[in-house]
Image: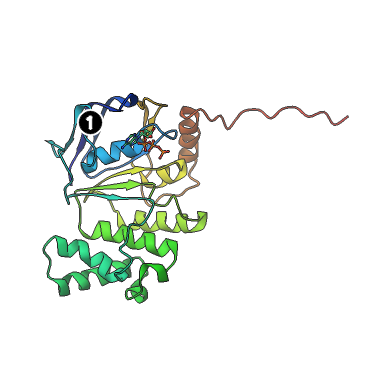
Amino acid sequence: MSSVTFEHVDKTFGSLNVLQGIDLLVEAGTFVALVGPSGTGKSTLLRMVAGLELPTSGQVLVGGEAVLGPDASRTLVFQEHGLLPWLTLQDNVALGLEFQGMPRVEARGHASQWLARVSLAEFARYYPHQVSGGMRQRTALVRALSVQPRVLLLDEPFGALDALTRLHLQQELSGLWTGGEMTVLMVTHDVEEALYLADRVIVLGPRPGRVIADHPVPQPRPRSRAAPSLLELRHRILADLGVNEFHPPKEVSLT
Ligand SMILES: Nc1ncnc2c1ncn2[C@@H]1O[C@H](COP(=O)(O)OP(=O)(O)OP(=O)(O)O)[C@@H](O)[C@H]1O
């Protein structure tokens, strides 16, 4: 596991100023969620940690070292599962381990164990098109976790799933990630998801994206989604995002 540091990071694409003056330290072994309006550069921040984009100025450091390109120790999981359609779920998971040099038979054994942890043991020999969207995303998640990256980057990982499947996967991720062993940065539009999973929620303001709030989540795990302190924090984060849930309803005359 490694810390992730953004030092005075600016990012522009042509004339578009996407991120400005990002200074952020994500401590090693913590789970941090990034929320903010569409187009504020959240995915761009993750892509810079993954080494897929470079800052226009400033730098991104992982474990104290500047990120200059992609590396297997930093894994990105997208909304689209990204599984290879011609490989079974087991072989999709095993592939990452094989890339790390693990012999094929051993990698397939590990892959089976990981799939069993997300209740997919009996689907190990299925191809991605033969399973549901939730099952594909579960597979993508364990594929990323199985290689034990130092930093796991989650970009709206459950964004394409129905609400119920999404809740199940959040619960599974919360069970798989017990803290300490890897640093996680997750982009989400779902404030409840952020509060259920993260140690800290960072709020980005409208473009050019800047950090406008940084909320620690003071709740031990496993969490209750209905904990009053989380509900209160949810209201505060929504207020940061310009959503006032307590806006009084207009008076309606019944006469
Ligand atoms: N490679 C690129 N080339 C040009 N512009 C880009 C590139 N990548 C991102 N952008 C622009 O940067 C801005 C921020 O994009 P980004 O995907 O980081 O935002 P986001 O906060 O993740 O948005 P959303 O919540 O809608 O996914 C957008 O206006 C986008 O068009």
Of all residues, the one furthest to the right in this rendering is 255
> What element does badge 1 sit on?
loop
Q: Position of residue 183 (x, y in %)?
A: 24, 45
Figure quadrant of residue 130: bottom left
- The residue that mark 1 highlights is 55
Q: Is residue 109 shown above or below 205?
A: below
Figure quadrant of residue 86: bottom left
Q: Is residue 8 shown above or below 85?
A: above
Residue drawn at point x = 26 percent, y = 43 percent = 30
Q: Is residue 171 shown above or below 212?
A: below
Q: Is residue 116 shown above or below 42?
A: below
Residue drawn at point x = 33 percent, y = 24 percent = 15
Callout count: 1
Q: Position of residue 21 (x, y in %)?
A: 28, 23
- The response on whether ligand 1 sits within 8 Å of label 1 is no
> Circle 1: is it few (<14), some (14-19), or many (20+) Cα within 10 Å?
many
| Ligand 1 shown in quarter | top left
Q: Nearer the viewer, residue 91 or 65?
A: 91
Residue drawn at point x = 29 percent, y = 61 percent = 142
Image quadrant in which the C terminus is located: top right
| Residue kind at label 1, given as amino acid type | Pro
Residue drawn at point x = 41 percent, y = 54 percent = 170
Figure quadrant of residue 104: bottom left
Q: Position of residue 196 (x, y in %)?
A: 41, 47
Q: Position of residue 165 (x, y in %)?
A: 47, 59
